[in-house]
Amino acid sequence: MQRRTFLQSAAAGPLAAASSAQLPKREYKGGVKLSIIGFGGIVVCGMDQSHANSTVAEAFDRGVNYYDVAPSYFDGEAETKLGPALEPYRKRSFLACKTTERDAAGARKELERSLVRLKTDHFDLYQFHAVGKMEDVEKILAPGGAAETFMKARKEGKARFLGASIHDAAAGIALMERFPLDSVLFPINFVLFQEGHFGPQILAKAKEKGIARMALKSMAHTAWPGADHKPWDKCWYKPIDHPELAEKAVRFTLSEEITAAIPPGEEKLFRMALDIGARFKPLDATERAELLAKAKGLTPIFRA
């Protein structure tokens, strides 16, 4: 699909009624279409179950059909809260999970526990989590490595698609070259593109290999200046919370040839991203240049 067609297929209408508008969807793989804004499981952490249930229900009603979670999020709370909340919508949703385990036995243990916690018999997408160095790749692919569990899980019907979340460009590219990934999840962000030189090379390799692209950190601004993260305790980086800049940042990410973006785990920021996604239109060349200029001098949270 050409870039212009790809982006136009996900562009929504005017700003009016964005808070109730349905999210556009884009192609993932095999005829699967996902909402351009996904739901990160961290959103439900810290909520009571009733609040988690209503938040997921509202997201689903807004058109969110892509949910991403990991057992490491808040010591499993994301899974235990998201499982019951998503259960009424499970058959109509795309559920992605991850593991940081690098050996087959550890990955199998986490896979089975995550299935139980999330009240499902399979994941639509199972991912190697936080591939951040070449050592991760070697361990994953070694005899007895996590890759063995992933391939078996697909044969068993416990994982339809296989992917990875990438925190290092070289390691991510190596994994794409050596393992049949269906998709990659990685930071696509204007500050990282401009100041960290991180993202374009992963995007290019994934496109070359026919691997679907999913985005993280669209609303990341820079590193926290100190230890106090308030008012955004769920973000290990300083997020963009100014509406105008957030709009441009999310549009920057969604203007790339990707399927979807996962916003921050803070409920307010997630809702902001939902509204931006509902009225999405690609950045034009002038807007893109102006946004990249605003990144100059900021400290990126990832570097190539």
Image (cartoon, helix red, strand yellow):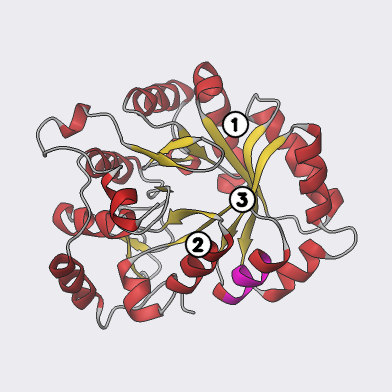
As displayed, is residue 51 above or below residue 146? above
Residue placed under numbered mark 1 in the picture: 80
Q: What's the residue at 18%, 56% (across, down)?
A: 242
- Magenta segment: 170-175
Is disc 1 placed on a helix, strand or loop? helix
Q: Are marks 3 and 2 in contact (CB under 8 Å)?
A: no
Position of residue 24 in the picture relative to residue 173 (left or right):
left
Relative image position of residue 63 (x, y in whole percent): 35, 28
Whether residue 225 can be seen here: no
Task: Give whichever of 163, 298 is nearer the camera.
Answer: 163
- Magenta stretch secondary structure, dominant: helix
As displayed, is residue 270 above or below residue 176? above
Residue 174 lies in the magenta-colored region: yes
Residue placed under numbered mark 2 in the picture: 207
Residue 182 lies in the magenta-colored region: no
Q: What's the residue at 39%, 32% (across, down)?
A: 64
User: How far is mark 3 from mark 1, CA to CA?
Assistant: 26 Å
Q: What's the residue at 77%, 59% (across, down)?
A: 102
Position of residue 283 in the picture relative to residue 28 (left or right):
left
User: How far is mark 2 from mark 1, CA to CA?
Assistant: 35 Å
N-terminal-most mark, 3 or 1: 1
Type of the residue with mark 2? Lys
Task: Give whichever of 140, 173 is nearer the camera.
Answer: 173
Q: Label 3 neighbourhood size at 10 Å, few (<14), some (14-19), many (20+)? A: many
| Nearer mark to the viewer, of 3 and 2 | 2
Residue placed under numbered mark 3 in the picture: 182
